[in-house]
Image (cartoon, grey):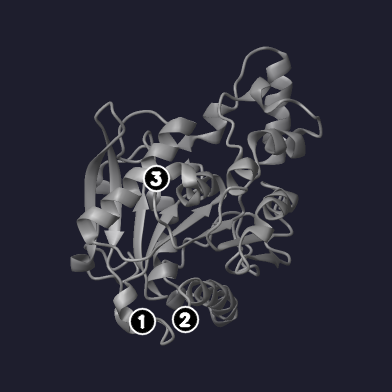
């Protein structure tokens, strides 16, 4: 969701030929065969700890692809009770599908948490079409699945970039689900604010997109503990977007916290020294990182684990 591309789209809008929704949902299809959980490349997680399923989402009978990874309880922080059985429901960004973000499973697996990742309808092996309304239903489906099928304990809703919207929705009263806490990384405040920061024009977001994704309004209703991280060098979703979110949620819970990650881009908040143009996907597990990046990951990990410990009242 780069600013230059948004500016180009805004120009095309004036020519009367584009809507932003297709840009927001930059999906890539995949078949179930593309998810090979017998490979050592997938974080070294034993295949018997991985469940891959298609589950119904919404009223139209669309099937949504979910992947559940059972925790390694030996990696759990000693301050946490193993009986809590903490599960991260992870909502990914707007590009590609789950395969692009699979390295994130390694991050949370390294913290001793169960992980549930899913592809929005229209992404990967999930059927149907992608809309704002469908995304909110899809995250509710992911939550219901992990609660009913895997008897998940405390659920933490985590969202990266576009995934911040469903993550916030799941934590809000509107979802009707019980969530222990929420964490967003590199999220945006709304389509209106995204358009404003990407085009330098105060255009109504409705001119460019049917999707509203008014995260700033939704987050104002969230009372569970909330943590926000954003890189100061993010050229895709301006750092100020998360400041807007923070102003809306900061006073709702004494455990809320905001981390300004100096020098981090849209793609490398966990390891801000990483110089790639995209996410550090070549390190499918933190243990594979070079020493300097691994030290940065340990800072990121500590922030998350400390937040979880506090949210669990430990």
Q: Do tag 1 and tag 2 residues touch (Cβ < 8 Å)?
A: yes
Q: Do tag 1 and tag 3 residues touch (Cβ < 8 Å)?
A: no
The answer to which of marks 1 and 2 sits earlier in the sequence is: 1
Report the side of 246 relative to 64 (left or right).
right
Dot 2, crowdedness within 10 Å: few (<14), some or many (≥20)? few
Please state which of the two labelled residues, at mark 3 or mark 2, is closer to the viewer.
Answer: 2
Q: Which residue is mark 2?
A: 314
Q: Residue at x 52, y 62 (%)?
A: 280
Q: Residue furthest bottom?
A: 78
Residue 74 seen in render: yes
Q: Residue at x 81, y 30 (%)?
A: 201
Report the side of 11 relative to 91 (left or right).
right
Q: Which residue is mark 1?
A: 81
The residues bearing labels 1 and 2 have C-alpha atoms spaced at a distance of 9 Å
Disc sitting over residue 167 in the figure: none
User: Residue 80 in the image: x percent, y percent?
Assistant: 40, 81
Q: Nearer the viewer, residue 277 or 20?
A: 20
The relative height of residue 215 versus residue 6 in the rendered view (above or below) is: below
Q: Secondary structure at mark 2?
A: loop
Q: Secondary structure at mark 3?
A: helix
Quarter of the N terminus within the rendering:
top right
The relative height of residue 61 versus residue 215 in the rendered view (above or below) is: above
């Amino acid at each position: 969701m780069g600013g230059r591309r948004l500016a180009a789209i805004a120009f095309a809008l004036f020519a009367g030929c584009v809507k932003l929704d297709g840009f927001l949902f930059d999906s890539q299809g995949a078949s179930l065969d593309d998810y090979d959980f017998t490979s050592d490349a997938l974080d070294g997680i034993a295949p018997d700890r991985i469940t891959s399923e298609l589950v119904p989402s919404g009223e139209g009978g669309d099937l949504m692809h979910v992947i559940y990874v059972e925790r390694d309880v030996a990696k759990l922080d000693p301050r946490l009770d193993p009986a809590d059985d903490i599960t991260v429901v992870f909502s990914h960004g707007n590009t590609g599908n789950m395969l692009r973000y699979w390295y994130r499973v390694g991050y949370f697996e390294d913290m001793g948490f169960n992980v549930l990742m899913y592809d929005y309808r229209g992404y990967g092996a999930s059927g149907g079409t992608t809309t704002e309304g469908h995304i909110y239903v899809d995250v509710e489906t992911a939550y219901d699945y992990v609660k009913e099928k895997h008897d998940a304990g405390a659920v933490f809703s985590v969202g990266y970039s576009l995934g911040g919207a469903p993550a916030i929705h799941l934590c809000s009263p509107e979802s009707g689900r019980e969530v222990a806490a929420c964490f967003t990384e590199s999220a945006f405040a709304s389509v209106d604010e995204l358009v404003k920061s990407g085009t330098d024009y105060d255009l109504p977001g409705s001119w460019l997109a049917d999707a509203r994704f008014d995260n700033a309004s939704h987050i104002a209703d969230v009372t569970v503990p909330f943590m926000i991280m954003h890189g100061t060098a993010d050229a895709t979703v301006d750092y100020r977007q998360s400041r807007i979110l923070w102003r809306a949620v900061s006073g709702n819970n004494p455990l809320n916290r905001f981390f300004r990650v100096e020098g981090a881009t849209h793609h490398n908040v966990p390891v801000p020294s990483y110089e790639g143009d995209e996410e550090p996907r070549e390190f499918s597990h933190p243990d594979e990182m070079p020493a300097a990046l691994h030290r940065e990951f340990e800072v990121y990990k500590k922030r998350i684990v400390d937040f979880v410990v506090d949210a669990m009242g430990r």
